[in-house]
């Protein structure tokens, strides 16, 4: 591992030690963040899996009801009446923060079913069809919210993992090697100074004896 090109002084040794301490704390924080994000993402994945099963079941029920409505009323009549149903109202998307990651929440008003069609041309099967497809729509909103959150968390986990790896595999070992290098040079210099001083004292003592 290459060390930083720095002058081996005590000041630079202290600076390198402080940088190492800061890098280690940064890694610990990133590791905790990664753990929390992974746990949150796995919980959402479980929710998405369960919700997807509900969506599939709701779609199956809705299409069965639609099939019955087509048989009882005729496809043309079903299409004509379906076009008179009120369109979905606008919705807002707000965000909440999960360890600094902005995940979406769909905000919309829950309004009761309002029929825009006359009952004389429809059947109870058609009403069930409308209700079942509204249920599908609600579940899809929820699923889209969760899947988008999972995607955002996965991207953040990837970035956090990359930063943590950079600290663990590159920065921290580099600071450790730099500290080791500076410390080794300073110790060697202290030994040289000690022996030099010892020789000077020895020569001075010998000179006095003469």
Image (spheres, grey):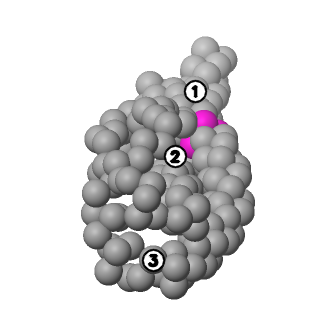
Tag 2 or tag 1, which sits nearer the N-term? Answer: 2
For discs 1 and 3, the disc positioned in front in the rendered view = 3
Residue at disc 2, secondary structure: helix
Query: Which residue: 34% across, 74% down?
Result: 77
Q: In this view, does 79 lie to the left or right of 52?
A: left
- Distance, label 1 to label 3, CA atoms, is 110 Å
Residue at disc 1, secondary structure: helix
Tell me the number on the disc at residue 67.
Answer: none
Whether residues under marks 1 and 3 lie with C-beta atoms below 8 angstroms apart, the answer is no
Q: For the C terminus, which image quadrant?
A: top right
**Residue 208 % position (x, y):** 61, 15
Residue at disc 3, secondary structure: helix
Query: Which residue: 71% across, 63% down?
Result: 50
- Distance, label 2 to label 3, CA atoms, is 78 Å
Residue 2, relative to residue 100: is it above or below? below
- According to the image, label 2 marks what residue? 175
Majority SS type along the magenta span: helix
Residue 18, relative to residue 51: is it above or below? above
- Distance, label 1 to label 2, CA atoms, is 32 Å
């Amino acid at each position: 591992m290459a060390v930083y090109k720095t002058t081996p002084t005590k000041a630079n040794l202290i600076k390198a030690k402080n940088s190492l301490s800061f890098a280690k704390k940064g890694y610990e924080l990133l590791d905790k963040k990664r753990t929390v994000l992974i746990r949150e993402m796995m919980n959402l994945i479980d929710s998405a899996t369960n919700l997807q099963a509900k969506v599939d079941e709701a779609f199956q029920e809705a299409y069965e009801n639609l099939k019955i409505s087509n048989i009882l009323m005729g496809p043309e009549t079903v299409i004509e009446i379906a076009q008179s149903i009120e369109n979905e109202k606008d919705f807002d998307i707000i965000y909440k923060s999960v360890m600094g990651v902005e995940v979406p929440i769909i905000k919309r008003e829950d309004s009761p079913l309002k029929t825009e069609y006359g009952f004389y041309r429809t059947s109870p099967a058609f009403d069930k069809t409308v209700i079942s497809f509204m249920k599908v729509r609600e579940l899809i909103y929820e699923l889209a919210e969760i899947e988008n959150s999972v995607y955002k968390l996965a991207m953040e986990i990837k970035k956090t993992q990359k930063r943590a790896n950079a600290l663990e595999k590159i920065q921290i070992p580099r600071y450790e090697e730099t500290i080791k290098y500076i410390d080794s040079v300073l110790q060697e210099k202290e030994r040289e100074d000690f022996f030099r001083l010892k020789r000077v004292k020895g020569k001075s003592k010998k000179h006095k004896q003469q």
